[in-house]
Image (cartoon, helix red, strand yellow):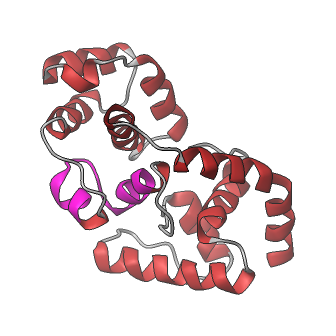
Amino acid sequence: MTKELWDHYEKIKNTIHSRLKEFKQPKNKKEIFRELCFCILAANTSSRMASRVMENVGDVIFYGSEEQIKEKLHSLSCRFYNRRANFIYHAQKIDIKYDRDYLVENFKGIGYKEASHFLRNIGYSGYAILDKHILNSLVEFKVIKEKPFGLNRKKYLEIENKMKKFSAKIEINMDELDFVLWSRKTGEVLK
């Protein structure tokens, strides 16, 4: 079964390397905040929808009132636009620190998956982005017994550690493995 995984990896590895290289590029404060907003928007929905909204949202996320952000997200057919506007508005007031626990504790709408996603997208390495596709794959490859109903900090880190061991065992870098497992299920290498 890992041969199939390696075959898939070989087909998309250049795309993965290009994407990871893009993430490692230096970013200014606005670009970093945009990535945070992207992760807020991607939570409990699709990366594709979050990308579409971020392409069209403009500068309202930086300076807008909660109502202005809400109106813009609504006009872009963003799911959960009320809550997400609230999360983005409150995020405007908080200094971003590049620590996963800090992000989870201080930003509304950011859990361990979203914090890991954000850190990966701004160039940090070694985090698992445990969405439904990754969790289903980890069950399929017998890395975990079953898909958990919820993921608190302890459970998230436990599964992430198992994924790191699996990554080492099959000799596919952790950051690349995330893309391989995700694209196997979705057919895409997105951000």
Residue 175, quarter of the rendered image = bottom right
At x 79%, y 62%, the residue is: 9
Is any atom of residue 1 visible in this view?
A: no
Residue 113, quarter of the rendered image = bottom left
Relative height, residue 140 to residue 48 (above, below): below
Q: Is residue 43 left or right of residue 11?
A: left
Task: Specify whether residue 103 is painted magenta.
Answer: yes
Query: Whole-percent x and y of residue 83?
Result: 22, 35
Residues 91 and 86: in front is 91
Q: Is residue 178 left or right of residue 108?
A: right
Q: Is residue 110 left or right of residue 130?
A: left
Task: Specify whether residue 157 is painted magenta.
Answer: no
Query: Whole-percent x and y of residue 184?
Result: 73, 56
At x 73%, y 79%, the residue is: 171
The mark tally for this picture is: 0
Relative height, residue 129 to residue 30 (above, below): below
Q: Main secondary structure of the magenta part?
A: helix
Relative height, residue 84 to residue 118 (above, below): above
Residue 84, quarter of the rendered image = top left
Query: Whole-percent x and y of residue 118?
Result: 40, 51
Query: Whole-percent x and y of residue 107?
Result: 20, 50
Work out which quarter of the rendered image holds the N terminus and state it: bottom right
Q: What's drawn in magenta, residue-wise?
A: 102-119
Relative height, residue 97 to residue 148 (above, below): above
At x 60%, y 70%, the residue is: 174
Work out which quarter of the rendered image holds the C terminus and state it: top right
Is any atom of residue 56 visible in this view?
A: yes
At x 52%, y 59%, the residue is: 132
